[in-house]
Amino acid sequence: MSSLGNNPARILYRNLQVEKGEDTDVKATRGLLARGQANKVRKEMDVEQPSIRVAKHVSIIRRKREEVNGRA
Amino acid sequence: MAELNEIVLDAPIAGQHMTSELGARPWQQAPQYTTVDEAIEYYLDRMASEDFADQLVDVLEMDVPVTTLANTIQMAGVMDGKHSIDVGMLVMPLLMEMIMLVGDMAGIKYDSGMENPNKGKTRDTLLESVRKRLQTEMNAKEGMLFSEDEIKGEDEIETDDTSDISMEDEEIKEPKGLMVRRTQ
């Protein structure tokens, strides 16, 4: 078997859950003592998982790529 | 002379000159970037440079698949001790996306490598199963060409031949050796 057949990149790219990586708006809170929404949003977005974080980055770059290609 | 005949037990093992002590290589050390975020930052900084983009475009124009490039880049990161293999695997889709972005921005056509390399090829296992089925069918047809009487007749002839041979063997058999008593 050739080395191309053993490349895991194709499968990893296909299995990446980009649909989960859609952006969510984080409302800014005012005041030094205001409770931040970061933890709540993180839980909602499930960004504790590294693969989800990568998926978010990928979705941003993919959007940029679609803009470049004129599909946006 | 006595010294020369002694077996040297502390001689180097064949191929030892090609090895190094454990921990001497970068990948045997603790990785520099332990998290995915750190690794992403490292790669994005590297890929943002113009030199890297130019080289990348040149390689993409040579029809090197994006998947192969991404795998090579992350493997180089592992070899340099930048991150672990696990982090490299997680980061690979991002590398692919970045490479494709660079290719799109340069306006070149590139091979994404997303097509299955085995697509359109006939599986070896399928070929083997077809070959076996064909062989059994051919054997069955060959068996039908000869009638049962013919097959039985051949068997009888074969058995007769073997009986003759056994008779000859019995005739030839004579006791051998120096102390054998001769009967005349």
Image: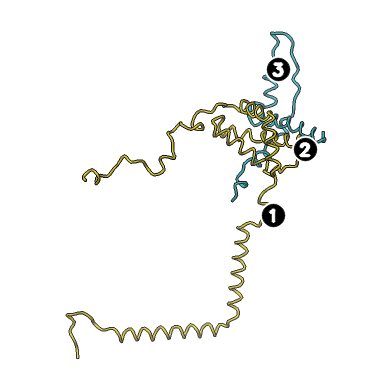
**Mark 1 falls on what kind of element?**
loop
Q: Residue B120 carries which label?
A: 1
In front: mark 1 or mark 3?
A: 1
Q: Which residue is at the far bottom?
A: B184
Label 3 CA crowd tier, 10 Å (few <14, some 14–19, many 20+): few
Q: Mark 2 lies on which chain?
A: B
Which chain is drawn using cyan? A
Q: Is residue B32 left or right of residue B111?
A: left
Q: Which chain carries label 3?
A: A
In front: mark 2 or mark 3?
A: 2
- The amino acid at mark 2 is Gly
- Residue found at x 72% / y 42%: B110
Label 1 CA crowd tier, 10 Å (few <14, some 14–19, many 20+): few
Position in image of residue B131 (x %, y %): 61, 65
Circles 1, 2 touching at the beta carbon (< 8 Å):
no
Residue corresponding to mark 2? B107
Q: What is the distance, in whole Å, between disc 2 and disc 3 at their CAs?
A: 41 Å
Closer to the chain start, of discs 1 and 2, is 2
Asked if marks 1 and 3 fall on the same chain, the answer is: no
Which of the 4 image quarters holds residue A43? top right
Which of the two residues, B34 or A27, is positioned nearer the viewer here? Answer: B34
**Which color was chain B given?**
yellow
Q: Mark 1 lies on which chain?
A: B
Circles 1, 3 touching at the beta carbon (< 8 Å):
no
- The amino acid at mark 1 is Gly
Q: Residue A37 carries which label?
A: 3
Asked if marks 1 and 2 fall on the same chain, the answer is: yes
Q: In this view, does B20 lie to the left or right of B41?
A: left
- The amino acid at mark 3 is Gln
Q: What is the distance, in whole Å, between disc 1 and disc 3 at their CAs?
A: 52 Å
Q: What is the distance, in whole Å, between disc 1 and disc 2 at their CAs?
A: 30 Å
